[in-house]
Amino acid sequence: MCGRFSFDILPELLVEIFGLAEPPAITPRYNIAPTQQVPVIRRYGDGQNHLDLLQWGLIPSWAQEKSIGSRLINARSETVTEKPSFRQAIRYRRCLVLSSGFYEWKQEGKEKHPWYIRLKDGAPMVFAGLWETWKSAEGEVIESCTILTTASNRLVAPLHDRMPVILSPDEYRTWLERTTTDPTSLKKMFQPYPADLMKMWAVSPMVNKVANDSAELVVPVGYATDTI
């Protein structure tokens, strides 16, 4: 799964990669948690990419209560076309969730120890996401999103059996393409990201507390590795 991640990408790099009109005013985050605002790229009707902040935890448009979003932070890629919460979004409302890397925890005895996982070359780690707009009976409007997951690769597997669907740069355009409404054509993207392009390291248990949010959280407390 993906339950916590970081975002520390230079605005100028976001312009270069995603063709944004101007550098976004966005603050680095090192401990992004469910129900918080997360940076995503969406393609509007004008054909341009835009960076937006959406609430993490998808609230289906038909939901009676917004609290359902806290249970829908991830969507299993294997069943995303079947679930009522996601089957319209996978056709018409896809987005790129931007990150620098994500956290996972390893059970050791009675304790869980956090690890930080990112790409070896330090490039942005972009997750396949879906988004929705929800409106309450009182008129409150919330735009929210979820992150697709797949089976873990050999690097992440010792920590958890699921990992986010990580897209390669040549898949960004296809994922955002608004004219693509047949989700079967997207399934080839749902494979585990190559383990040999990733690395991870143990980090401080300070990340366990959501209120902690500083660059110190991603500093290794041991040796970086491509296996454990």
Image (cartoon, grey):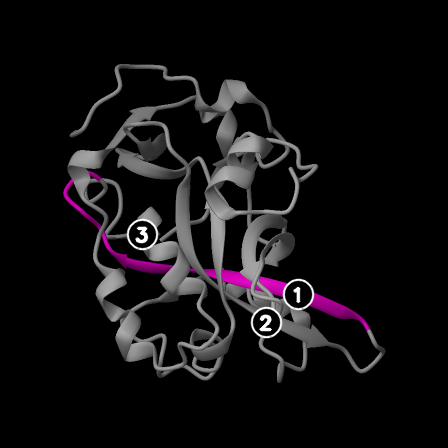
Q: Quadrant of residue 30?
A: top right
Residue 99 is tagged as none
**Residue shown at the point (58%, 23%) measured from the top left:** 214
- Left or right of 67 in this view: 131: left
**Residue shown at the point (54%, 21%) measured from the top left:** 215
Q: Earlier in the sequence, mark 3 or mark 2?
A: 2
Identified by mark 3, the residue type is: Asp
Q: Which residue is mark 3?
A: 170
Identified by mark 1, the residue type is: Glu
Q: Which residues are magenta?
A: 140-155
Against 58, residue 38 (above or below) is above
Against 166, residue 85 (above or below) is below
- State the separation of the CA atoms marked 3 and 2: 25 Å
Q: Which residue is mark 2?
A: 132
| Mark 2 vs 1: CB contact within 8 A | yes
Q: Which residue is mark 1?
A: 143
| Mark 3 vs 1: CB contact within 8 A | no
Q: Earlier in the sequence, mark 2 or mark 1?
A: 2
Secondary structure found at label 2: strand
- Camera-side residue: 49 or 70? 49
